[in-house]
Image (cartoon, rainbow, N blue to C red):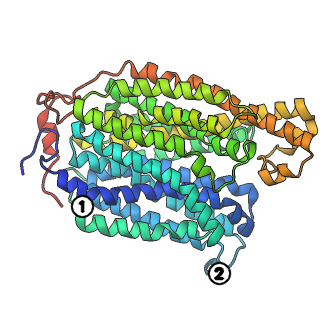
Amino acid sequence: MTETETGAVPGRRREVMVVLPGLMLAMILAMLDNMIVGTAMPRIVGELGGLTHLSWVVTAYVLGTTVSTPIWGKIGDLYGRKTIFLASIAIFMVGSALCGMAGSAVFGGTSGGMGELIGFRALQGLGAGGLMVNAMAIIGDLVPPRERGRYQGIMAAMMSLAMIAGPLVGGFITDNLNWRWAFYVNLPIGAVAFVWLLFRMHLPKYRTEHRIDWLGAGLLGVGITALVLITTWGGNQYAWGSWQILGLAAVAVVTLAIFIPVERRVAEPIMPLHVFADRNFTLISLIGFLLGFAMFGVINFLPLFQQTVQGASATNSGLLLLPMMAAMMVVSLFVGQAITKTGKYKIFPIVGGVVMAIAMWLLSLMDVNTARWETGVFIAVLGLGMGGLMQTTMLVAQNSVEQKDLGVASSASTFFRSIGGSFGVSLFGAVFNNHLTANLTEKLGPEAARMVEGGNERLDPAALAQLPAQVRTGFLESLASSISGVFFWAIAFAVLVPLLAAFIKEIPLRGGPEAAPGDAGTGGDPAKETAAVGAFD
């Protein structure tokens, strides 16, 4: 086998197809987990208590994932991705097992069970941070960018299926087994992925100095933690002007300000700042942030609208999201094949951003009289837009850096999307709460508005069904109007995506016939592309 200027070895399609099932299983673990756990949360709270800490079950997982993502990407670049990827699967499985045992007799009963679950979810998130980023980076190791779209499209399609299956599996487990199996179900899937990849995956080893930027990793972790806490607590648990939020903001600013000069001086920075000198990389990072901001921020409210306003059951919420997921899956596959065939990619984030903005506008028109089929059409349009954006953001990021920085590019792409999602959920949550309070005050008076302060604990279908018809109608109208307001605000962020994408320079993808040696968008030095590749483990 010979090496190419891309760092990939030709004729490795068979190796990719052998590895792909294990990679997809590992990615499905992370995607499936959140969907299943969300369905099981009412039962978890019923057994462990701690309703006021409910949001931390999600926040701890997101925090662990977000903080660890850039670190997983960097150590994968340094030590080889096979060992690091297997380690992330193992950590995720240990975290899953411990989550399933939280509040059990193993740890002394249900007293303190919610605190145990939150801590174990953070550990699980640490493992999950390495699943997505290293799966994408492994594809980057084995496949040149020109061929990468096909495989990333397949993986994006599998992610869509996982998002559909999650609520359905979670509903079945919750209704027929025990909420603990929402975590235990990860163990056999993770074990199969681990064993498969242990014996079937062979990746290039890199000749790199093994130096970990622990100071940079610590500063980045503290800064990210402060930002996530701000987006989680701000406007909810604490006022935006409170000393807690202002103190966290100060911590974030100081640590990230120190982080920049530190990264410029160390030999092996955890996030090399030179990659941001590339215009494409910077633009696609901003697009990823906006994609996460708009996508995760608004998708969070779709189940609430469908279950509360339209009267759907929790188990059926997965089926109601099918139009969006199916559209995203089909477009992801089409885009991947089209990029592989033509080598052109700039048009897809532009069109995807335009379609996503149109979908947000359509969703902003929903009210209490909107039929389920209409919502299905609107979210199908959203899926079309997301399908044009999901894997192209990763592809452009990877094509904008040298092969030795592939893990950093993959982790940065995932990182900015996650941070955008955290900000989106927080901002749109504040918008929703303010609109809901104002609408309820107008329709039903201040007493009704006070009922939903402090987390909207009483806004569930069962509670609403017990209200008098006139009051219930006022609640539903207020709720629908508030959710529509969230989608309206999302338009402003969605329209920025195609505007930024228009400035992307379409550099030929490495590995394509039109890509001359050295024209890789990474400085044009083939030696840099090949120096990192040695033996295969």
| Side (left or right) of 265 relative to 230 | left
Residue 358's place in the image compared with 188, above or below, is above
Q: Report the amino acid beneath label 2.
A: Ala
Residue neighbourhood size for the residue with mark 1, other residues' Cα within 10 Å, grouped as few (<14), some (14–19), many (≥20): some
* Residue at mark 1: 201
Residue 346's place in the image compared with 269, above or below, is above
Q: Report the amino acid beneath label 1.
A: Met
Secondary structure under the numbered disc 2 in the rendered image: helix
Secondary structure under the numbered disc 1 in the rendered image: loop
* Residue at mark 2: 105
Q: Position of residue 451 (x, y in %)?
A: 87, 45
Q: Position of residue 187 (x, y in %)?
A: 46, 70
Q: Position of residue 86 (x, y in %)?
A: 34, 63
Residue neighbourhood size for the residue with mark 2, other residues' Cα within 10 Å, grouped as few (<14), some (14–19), many (≥20): few
Find residue 359 and report its image quarter: top right
Q: For residue 254, which numbered disc appears in the image? A: none
Residue 186's place in the image compared with 470, above or below, is below
Find residue 245 and report its image quarter: top right
| Side (left or right) of 52 relative to 4 | right
**Residue sitting nearer the eye, 415 or 380:** 380
Q: Answer yes or no: is residue 454 visible.
A: yes
